[in-house]
Image: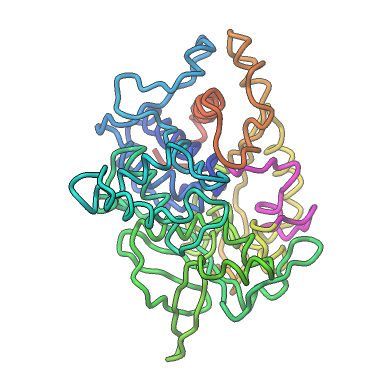
Amino acid sequence: MTVGLSFSGGGITGLLASTCVLNSLNTQFDTFSTNDLAFSTTSGGTIGYGIFTNAGPPGTDAMYFPEYDTSMSYDDANTELTGGKDYWFANANSYLEFTASPKPTAKHRDVALTLGANETETAGTSAAMHKAHSRMVGLGSALPSTSGWWRLAIDTCFYLGYGIHDYDITPGTRDWYVNMGLLKQNGCPISLDSDGVYEDASGKLWLAVMDMVPGTIANPQGYAVTDDVSTLDAMSYSSAFWVASIVESSAQYLLLSNTLMSASAKKDGTEKDFYWTDGGFVDTTGVVAHLQQQTSSIVTFYNNNDDLTELSAPWSFLFGVMGGGTDTMNHIEGPTLGQVFADSSLWDDVYTNLTDGSILRATLSNVEILENSYLGTTAYTLDSLVIISNQYSDEFIDSFTDSQIKSKLDANFPNKFDVALPTLDANVLCMMQDYKVQTYADELKTALGL
């Protein structure tokens, strides 16, 4: 039996949740870290998996994760806990939040100094500051002005947030598929219809999946990427959510197309120019990469930063159901191109279970998978699919004895945070992942072959 585990996109929410799920699975199951599993990630889930692989595996003692504890006090839950380890699990909060900052802050100056110190021996020299400032262009501005700004942001997060230099970032040794989008440059800017669907997606927007350990990239349309792509590159491409606002606006595309990350790909001797986009443009869930491999059992943690009752497209489109349509960056190919599950009638029950705060889980057996040339799947029967969602749960929140935890959570908890989470919400989000893993431990053990 081949087993796949996927972590969805979802901005900072998807990033933090994926690290917490990985920690919880390692804690709950002794064989998780050594079992033969394949991983697939998109966007925030990609960065989260990368952080955990490099700073969080058992034995490293680098990251501290708050475990589900109903007796935890509000004061502890509202603290950046380290528990004697080196880093609070949610340090990414501090180093990726500047993507939405309107102007540079003192924190950005510290980042610039640190990065500048890599160029000279003394970070405080004017030369170092000048060099650092040039490397930080775009990080403290609402309008980035260089194509490498997002890669540098993630580099900063790894280094200052978790002590990992860019040259030490590794994909690990386990199968890891990273989802990215390839958008033809000659198709930009693009237009979406009233449902948020990009009608030209079949010929202009494609999924690219990087097998991280060997570093190979597969594309269902048969184009071979000719550029070298590092682990850090792949994380920055997979999570490039900000591309949407540029390529979907004529004015922004005119002003900011130079900030987009370019790719070259070749087929039958003909080379085409593309832009890398967030993998969620085509598949937010990360499930498709496993289906391409005809994986027999899949467990997927869906931690998108959108309430499923408001945006169901990342899942409904896979069942061929339009629902309420999509937004500007999730599965914009639509339900016709995007359907992989043959039986659309399954969707209603899946949706009901995923959005019920007392369940947060849907399971399917013997699922017929369609041949889909756009997404690169072939027809087969998927033995088992377990989906675990990230909806608000009274059962979970009310389990804490300190009522302040519930009363002081942000109204956006747990899936409506655009960028950074408050400390309390980050810790409670992490405990929620542990709660779900504990709740469905028996099912997960079976589905993951542990």
Residue at image point 41% right, 31% down: 89
**168 sits to left or right of 193:** left
User: Foreground: 333 or 343?
Assistant: 333
Residue at image point 57% right, 77% down: 184
Among all residues in the image, which is located at the extreme front? 126
User: Foreground: 235 or 321?
Assistant: 235
Among all residues in the image, which is located at the extreme left? 121
For residue 281, above or below residue 431: below
Residue 1 in the image: state x and y as whole percent: 42, 52
**361 sits to left or right of 63:** right
Quadrant of the image occupied by residue 95? top left
Residue 403 in the image: state x and y as whole percent: 63, 10
- The answer to whether residue 439 is visible is no
Among all residues in the image, which is located at the extreme bottom? 269
Residue at image point 47% right, 51% down: 139
Residue 201 in the image: state x and y as whole percent: 65, 73
Residue 421 in the image: state x and y as whole percent: 55, 33
Range of magenta residues: 303-327
Asked whether residue 85 is drawn in magenta, I would say no
For residue 22, above or below residue 289: above
Quadrant of the image occupied by residue 62? top left
- Give the mark count: 0
For residue 95, above or below residue 62: below
User: Foreground: 288 or 190?
Assistant: 190
User: Foreground: 140 or 14?
Assistant: 140
- The answer to whether residue 56 is visible is yes
